[in-house]
Amino acid sequence: MSDDRVDQWLAFAREFLRALADRKRKQFDRRVSIGDLLTERDENAAAYGFGEGTTMYDNVLVLGTVKVGRNTWIGPGCILDGSGGDLQIGDWCSISAGVQIYTHHTVKRSISLGREPIEYAPTRIGDGVYIGPNSVIQMGVTIGNHAIIGSNSFVNGDIPPGAKAFGCPARCRAK
């Protein structure tokens, strides 16, 4: 293909993306990545078999076995790592931007120079859970129904139902 033809296609693509961006801005008053211009958040979630009414941005990284219930919102830049077995997220959850949820880690493997195996454990997020932006949920953790995890928290232990937890590591505070 000639350089002139490539330049024509690029001009067309840029104009097309500008039109999609204008539409998204008018519809939702937001600016999103190219992937989110070309896809719909409910369709992204449905493609993974997530529950009815669940939405997720195009740039969410989904690995392994991840099950998500109904009406859950998964924000931009999240990592849902079910590669270590089983990650379950309930109904009516808010998984804020940048949240990372894991079912495995490679700490012992790394520090043993590969002599130790990768460790795996299922991770469970209950119904009606809010996880604040940029929080990290370690493998093997269970977060009970209606719990709140504060922004920038590192959750490396179970959180009971209805608890409010935040910090590094996350600790439960008064309800």
Image (spheres, rainbow, N blue to C red):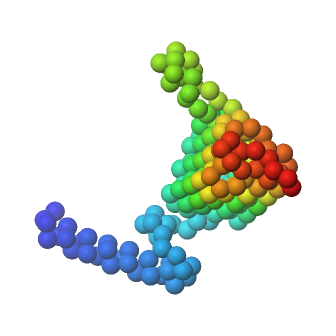
Q: In this view, does 141 lie above or below 112?
A: below
- Find residue 171 and report its image quarter: top right
Q: Is residue 51 above or below residue 117?
A: below
Viewer-nearest residue: 118 or 64? 118
Q: Is 146 left or right of 103, judged from the image as shown? A: right
Q: Position of residue 69 (x, y in %)?
A: 74, 55
Viewer-nearest residue: 114 or 65? 114
Q: Which residue is drawn at 16% across and 62% down?
A: 1
Judge whether residue 85 can be spotted in this image: yes
Q: Residue furthest top?
A: 115
Q: Position of residue 134 (x, y in %)?
A: 59, 53
Q: Position of residue 35 (x, y in %)?
A: 46, 63
Q: Where is residue 149 in the image (x, y as percent from the top left)?
A: 72, 53
Q: Is residue 103 above or below residue 15?
A: above
- Find residue 29 and report its image quarter: bottom right
Viewer-nearest residue: 152 or 28? 152
Q: Residue at x 71, y 45 (%)?
A: 170
Q: In which quarter of the image is the C terminus?
A: bottom right
